[in-house]
Structures are given as C-alpha cells and as structure tokens.
Image: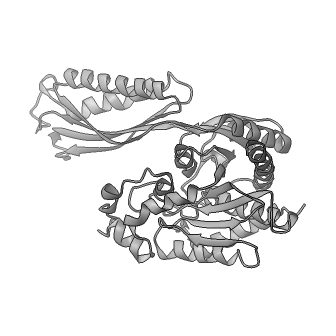
Amino acid sequence: MSLNPKRTIAELKELRDITADGNGAQRLAWGDTWLKARAWFEGKLAGLPVEHHLDAAGNRWVTLHGASPRALLIGSHLDSVPNGGWLDGCLGELAGLEILRRFATEYDGRPPVTIRLVDWADEEGARFGRSLLGSSAFAGTERIEADRVRTDRDGIRLDAALLRCGVEIDRFPEARGERANAAAYLELHIEQGPVLESLGLPLGVVLGTKGVERHAITFHGQEAHSGSTPMNARRDALAAAAKLALEIREIARKHPDAVSTMGSLKTFPGIVTAVVGRCEATLDQRDLDAAILAGMYAEARAASERFAVEEGCRVEWSRIWNIEPVPFHAELIELCEQAVRETAGTVKRLPSGPLHDAAEVARAGIPTVMMFVQSLGGISHNKIEDTREDYLKLAIEALDRLAAGTINWIITKS
C-alpha cells in the first residue's frame, strides 16, 4: 500500500517551518504568508496526474479524474488564525493530498470515481470576521453585499484584499459550479477540544456542527458617582450583566453538549469612580439540537429581562449572527465509525462546537462527514496546539479507509 502518513507529518512540519514564527502559524487568509503556503502546496502537486485551478471564490481544486465523473471531495484549509497552531486546517488538507497520491498510484492515475481535493479559502475569518468565506460561495450561502464592506484593523476592505489575490467578490456565485457531480465530502480535523483526550481516545466521529446563536446585549442603567450613591439607589448596568454571565452557564449545563459564552464586556463610562451606566456584552450559544438552542436563547433573554428589572435597568438585544445546526450524513457517519474502529478500536461520536467548511458543504445537500483526531490539552488557535504523532498517523490511515469505503458507497449509489 502506497499510503505514507510519515510523509504527511514531515510535510506538516515543513509547512510550519516556512509559515510560522516564534508565536505560531501566520497563514492569515489573503496575506503574503498564506499565498506562500498555497504556492508551496501547489509545488507538492508536481508529477501527479491531476489538474488544478482556483474557482471564483479563491478555493483551490485538485482533480484526479476517475472512471466515473461522480466525485469524492476531500477538503480542509491552509489558512490559520494569527499565532495559530501547526495542525489546524492544514492537517486535513495534507492528509487529503496523501490519500489522493495513494489512489493515483494504485489505480494508475484513474480510480473508480473522480477524487477532488479542495483547499477552502478563508475558513477562519480571522482578518475580516467572516468565517467559511470560500465554502459559503461554493454552497450558495454567501452574502456579498454584507461581506464586501467588512474591514480589517487597518481599514482595508474585504473586496479589496480579495482583488489583490485575483479574486473578484462579485463572481462568488460562479463557485457553485464546482458542486457538479459531487457525491460525498470528507474532512479530517483536530478536535480543538478536550473530549477525546479525557476519554483516552485518538479518534472521533463527528455527528455534525452545532448551531450558533450570537447576540449583542446592552444593559442601560444610570451613571452615578461611586462615592455618593447608596447601594440601594444604584441602577448598575454591570451588575445586571454579571448576573446574566453566571446564569448562561447554568442554562447550558442543563444539556450535555451545549455551551454558552459571554465573551466580551464593555462598560461606560468605564472609570473607577462611576457606577456603570451602560454595559455592552456579547453572547455565543451552541448546540447540535435546534430545539435546545432555541430554548437556551429564550431562557437567556428572559433571564436578562429579570436581572434588568432587579437592578433598575433596561436591556436590549441585537442578533449578530446565527447558523442552524448541521447534522452530517447518517450513512457516512456509519462508514466513518467503521473506519475508526478498524484503525483505532474504540469509537466516540461527538458534535463539533467549532464551525467547519464541512457544514457549508452539507448545507449544499452533499453527503458529508468529519473525523476528529485528539488535541493535546484541548488547545487550538495557539502555538502550543499539538497532537501525538502516532495519533496523526492513525488519523491519516483512518481517513484513507473512510475514503475507500465512501468510494464503494458512491459506486453502489450510482
């Protein structure tokens, strides 16, 4: 068998060496280091019987044509957050490349079905705050008018940054054409959380990506002098927000896979000698069950109104963004479980809290599944992100088994 996981691990380290500094990976989408990483990746295609191109949204497609035009898609992303880790995104991409090599060798350049490897553009959304940009164009869920005017911290607009890389945002809808003949999509990713490590398991089968409710919440009280205002006369907006910050944890704890986070807080006037008159907070809630997510939102909103009354304040809510839960394909979940069991033994099914391009592919109606590999300490988006190399090897082998099983599944469905 020509699969060589050690080569993939070596290539991951090579990519780290050329695109990271002392603070971690610096492959920020649409920047020079990201373009350098993509050029490096393109060099790895030399000698393979493939064709490759960039679509209208900047996604790179590598195609190994098969006896059938029905296509197995394998994908991930090369971009990173600033000061990111050495595995997030690029593990799945380079593992997919190794599997493509294996099929090209064993089938003399013509596997039973077409195999397409995709490097999604700007999965992270780290620079402009718009995650899953390239895959949303593929899925047809892009929001061009809302996204084009997004700016980075230097005031550069998203559409201008894309154009510098040869991508015209108005042509995004053309990327939907890449969906032709897509029969299934697979993605390998580090877990980015502590569940697999806590269970002592190397690999997990992903049931789907959690839905997200993300809101801005503003409590309005009354600014007052901190020295002269009695405690029972205060209308403290921070006090109401603090109560909510504690309450959302209890709301989430009612459900085994739910999470709820108040991630930012701003107070006004924000000085030590004044009672807080206005407090602006953000809330992020996630669960794989749409009904649970809706219930958590309703509970949090009711709690905020109760705490506002208790503190003599009023509260306003504004939705920042939301996405529905995206369950993955039941039959592909079974195939993924089989591949993990054959490779690593014990199987754990779990939802994904972080968003992934796989969710956009699934939203486009393409059968999809993801596989997770354990993250040491549950840490990601950080230079200390890591996974045991023997587990990386298992992950690549399991993804290969999953690809082989999925090809047979595609053939039977044709």
Q: Is residue 396 visible?
A: yes
Residue 105 horizontal side relative to residue 14, left or right: right
Q: Horizontal and vertical percent for residue 146? A: 31, 55
Image colouring: one colour
In the foreground, 311 or 179: 179
Question: Is residue 276 at all visible to an observer of this figure?
Answer: no
Which residue is painted at 41% across and 62% down in the image?
A: 127
- Asked whether, in this view, residue 331 is left or right of residue 289, the answer is right
Report the number of numbered marks.
0
List x then y, in percent, for residue 279.
23, 39
Say if 172 sits above or below 338 in the image. Answer: below
For the point 18% across and 39% down, which residue is it? 278
**Nearest to the observer: residue 332 or residue 110:** 110
Report the residue at 26% width, 29% height from top: 240
Q: Nearer the viewer, residue 137 or 226?
A: 137
Q: Quadrant of residue 346?
A: top right
Where 371 falls versus 95 (above or below)?
above
Q: Position of residue 205 (x, y in %)?
A: 69, 39
Looking at the image, residue 231 sits to the left or right of residue 16; the answer is left
Q: Quadrant of the image for the N terminus?
A: bottom right
Residue projecting furthest to the right: 1
From the top left corner, tell me how far across and down residue 194 is, in percent: 63, 41
